[in-house]
Image (spheres, rainbow, N blue to C red):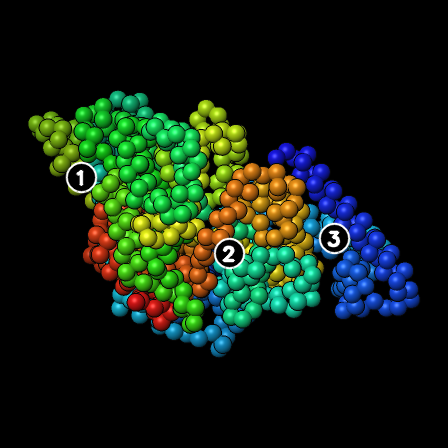
Amino acid sequence: MSRIGRAQIQTTAIALLVVGLIIGLAVGYLVAPGKTVTETKTVGAGETITTTITKMITETVGAEGTITIKAWASGSPVDTTRVENIKRAAEILNQMLAAAGVNVRIEVETQFFRGDYMDKLTAAFSAGEAPDIIAMKNLPTLADGGYVIALDDYVQKYWTLLEDVYPTLWNAVKYKGHIWAIPQDTEARPLYFRKDVLRQLGWSEEEINALPEKIMRGEITLQDLIQVAKQAEEQGLVEWGFYHRPNWGGTPFLILYYQYGGVAQDPDTGKLVLDKDAALKTLQLLYKMAQEDKVLPETMIGTDWRTIHSDFVNGRVLFWFGGTWHWAEWQRVEYHEQLGALPEDYEWENIGFALVPAPEPGLKPMTLSSPYLYYVTSQSKYPEIAFLLIVLATSAPLDAIHAVDSGHLPVRMTTVDHPYYKKSKFHSEVAYMLEYTSFEPLHPKYTAYKEAWITAIAKVEKGEATPEQALNELVNTLQAEIGEDIIIR
Amino acid sequence: MARSIGRRLLPLLFLAPMLLMIALAWVSPLVLTVYLGFTDLSIKNFLAFVKDFFTDKVSITLDNFRRIFYAEDPYVGETLRVTVLYVVSVLSINAIYALALSIAIAYFTKNELLSMILRVTWLLPRITPGIIYALMWIWFIDPKYGLLNEMLRLMGVPDSWLPDSWLLRKPYSQMLMIMINGYVGASFGMIVYTAAIKSIPPDLVNAALVDGASEFQVARRIIIPLLKWPILFVTAWQTLSLLSSYEYILMVWGAGSGQGYGIARSAGVMVWSLYSYTKAFAEHLYGYASALSLILVAIGLALIILYFKIFGFRRLMEPSRVEV
C-alpha cells in the first residue's frame, strides 16, 4: 500500500474525528445550554468523550502548555507503526484539543528497538527517565516488577472507546485480577507453502488452492505433508522440506504440544504445566522429521533469520512455519536473490498459507497468537494522557494501518470494515485463522520454560538425545529452574 | 620540610589518576558484585531494590551459591566443562603455539622483511575491530557461501567430514570457538616472545652454531630455556583473561532473550562468563549473575596466588625478562 494511501486515510480519519467532535460539542451546547456536562451524562457520544478528555487534560496540564510523552517499542523492521501510531494518536488528540479551544499540545518522542530492550528500560527507570508508554510482551514481569500500572479504572472510564476490542484479547492483558495493558496487535502463525514446487510435483491449481481448506478440515495432516516434502526433496525440487523458527516463538513447538493435548498453564492455579505424554509426542515428531525423514535440517535451532527467509523466498524450502507478519516482511526486506523485495503478486502466485496441520489423523489444526501490548509505565507523569494515546493508537483507522503494513491482525472488531483493511486480500484470507488460535501462558517464569524446551528440541533434532532422554532432561530442568511453579504430569 | 612533603606527595599526585581509575573501574564494580551476589536482585524486584540499595531492607541470602554448588542449576556442570575446554585449548594456542610461531618467525625466518610481514599477518585480527572480526568469521564459515568448507574440500577433506553448520554442530562449533579466540590471542604471546627472542645476544646462538649445534638444537636448547619467564608471564596473563573473556563467542553465537542464549548452549560454547552475562542481560537475574561472576573472581585470585607461589610470579615483575 502506498504512502499516499496511508496519509490520505490518516487525514480523512482525523478530519472525520474533528468534524464529529465539533458537531458533538455544538449539539451538546444546544441541547443543554448553560448546564455543566458531567462525565456520566450522555448527551451525545462525541460530547461526553470530548468533554471528559478536555476536562482531564486541563486538570492535569493546565489551561495551556506543551507536554512530551515518550514511547518505546520494538519489533521487526515493519513494526515501526508501533511508535508511529502513537505520534498519529497525538496528532488526533491535538486536533481535538484545538477544536475544543484548549491550548494544550502533546508531543511524542519515540524510540524503536530491533530486539529486547528490557536492560535499557531498567536503566531508564533507575535514572527516573522511563518512557510513558512501552510496547512489548512480558506482562507478568512488568506487572510484578512495578514497571507498569494497572489500567482497570481508565478502561472503565473510557470504555466507549474500547468496546470494539476483540473480547478474547482481554484475556491476554489480564493478570492477577487486573488489566495491565491494551492489546496492540495480534497475529496468526500459519504454515506457508511454495505453490510453484507443488505445481512441479504435479499438483493441479485446484489441489493447491484446496490445500488450506483440507488442512482446516483435518483431511490433510502433517504426516501427509512430510511425505510430500520427501518427494520434493527426492526429485531435487527443494533442498529442505520444512523450516521452522530458529528459536521458540511458539510456532510450531507449542502448537504441536497443544495439538497433542498438552496444556502449558493450569487455569486454576496459574502454574506452568508440562504434560509428559504430549511433550514426548512433540519431541518424537521433531526427531522423526530431522533424523529419520530428513525433511528438516538438524541444526534448525539457531539458523540465522536471513538464511531462513532467503531459502524460503527463493524456493529452496517447501514448507515454512512462519507468522502472518512475514508476508509483509518479504515485501519490504530484500530476501529474493533476483527480485529483492517480493511484489505481492509474486507472493500470491508462488506462496500459500494454511493452519498448522494436525500432526496426526484425528487431531486438530491450530495456530497461535501472541498479542503485543501497550502499557503505561509507573513513572509516567501523565498516565491518563498516555492511556488515551494508546487507546487512540489502537483505534480502527490506526489499527488498520499497523495491521496491513506490518502483516499483523487487528485488535479491534471495527477495523475489518475499514477501507484500508478491506483492500488487503491477505488479511481477509487469514482472518479465519483466529478461530483456530491458541495463546502462550502468562507466567513470570515462562522464559525458563521456553529455554528448557528449546534445549530439548535442539538436542533431539541434532540427534544428540533420543526423545525420551530429552524429555527426562526437560523435566529435570523445569523442576530445577521453575520449582514450585511447574506441574509435571 | 615542605620540600620533603612535596617529594612524598608528588608520586601520589602522579599516581592519583590511575588509582582513581582503578577505584572506579575495578574496585567499585567488585564491591557491587560481591554485594549483589548475596541478594536475589532480578528484574522483578529491581525498582524496589534501587530504592533500598545498601539498606537493611535488602535481604542477604546464600541462595545463589547454593544453586551453583549443589548443582541445583542444571546448566552449571556443562558450563564448567565447556569453560575448562575453552581455557585449556585456547591457552595452549596462545602460550605454546604462539611460542612455536615466534621461534619460526623470529629465528628461523632469516629474511627480516618476510619476518615482519608474517608478524603483521598474525597481528591483523588484533587490530581489526572485534565486531568486524566476528562478522568475517561468520561469513567465512557459512556452509553454503563461506570459503572454509570450500578450502577444506580443495585440500581433499571428504564431504562427509564437513559439518552442515560450523556454528551449531558439536564438536565443530567448539573447534570454531577455539580457533576464533586462539587466532586473536596468539598475537599477544607472539609479540612478547618475538621481543624476547630478539633480545637474546647473538653471541650465544653463534657460539652454539660454531660448536656444531643444528638450528633445531639452538631453538630447543638455547631459545626456549631463555624464554622461561616470558612463557610463564603469557600463560598467567592469558589464563586470567580467558576466564573472563566471552566477547567473540557472544558476537558469533549471540546472546539475548531466547535466540542467542539457546544457540550458545546448544552449540556447546556456553562458557562461564557468557553464562553469567546471559543470566544478567537475557534473563535479568542480576543477583545470580553476580554470584556466578564472583566464582570467576575467586578462581582468578586463586590462580594468581598459585602462579605467585609455584612459578615465582614475583620474578616476572623484575626488569630483565630474559636471563643471560
- Helix, strand or loop status at disc 1: helix
Which residue is at the far bottom? B56
Find residue A93 and name its label: 3
Locate residue A130, reporting x and y percent: 60, 58
Question: Mark 1 or 2, which is nearer the eye?
Answer: 2
Locate residue A306, reporting x and y percent: 42, 36
Which residue is at the far right? A34
Q: Within 10 angstroms of label 3, few (less than 14), some, or many (20 or more) residues?
A: many
Find residue B224 and name its label: 1
| Chain of the residue under the numbered disc 3 shown in the image | A
The residue depicted at 77 percent of the width and 47 percent of the height is A16
Q: Amino acid at mark 3?
A: Leu
Locate residue B19, reporting x and y percent: 46, 57
Question: A258 or B241, which is in the foreground?
Answer: A258
Q: Which residue is mark 2?
A: A137
Q: Amino acid at mark 2?
A: Lys
Q: CA distance from mark 3 to mark 1?
A: 78 Å
Question: A8 or B237, which is in the foreground?
Answer: A8
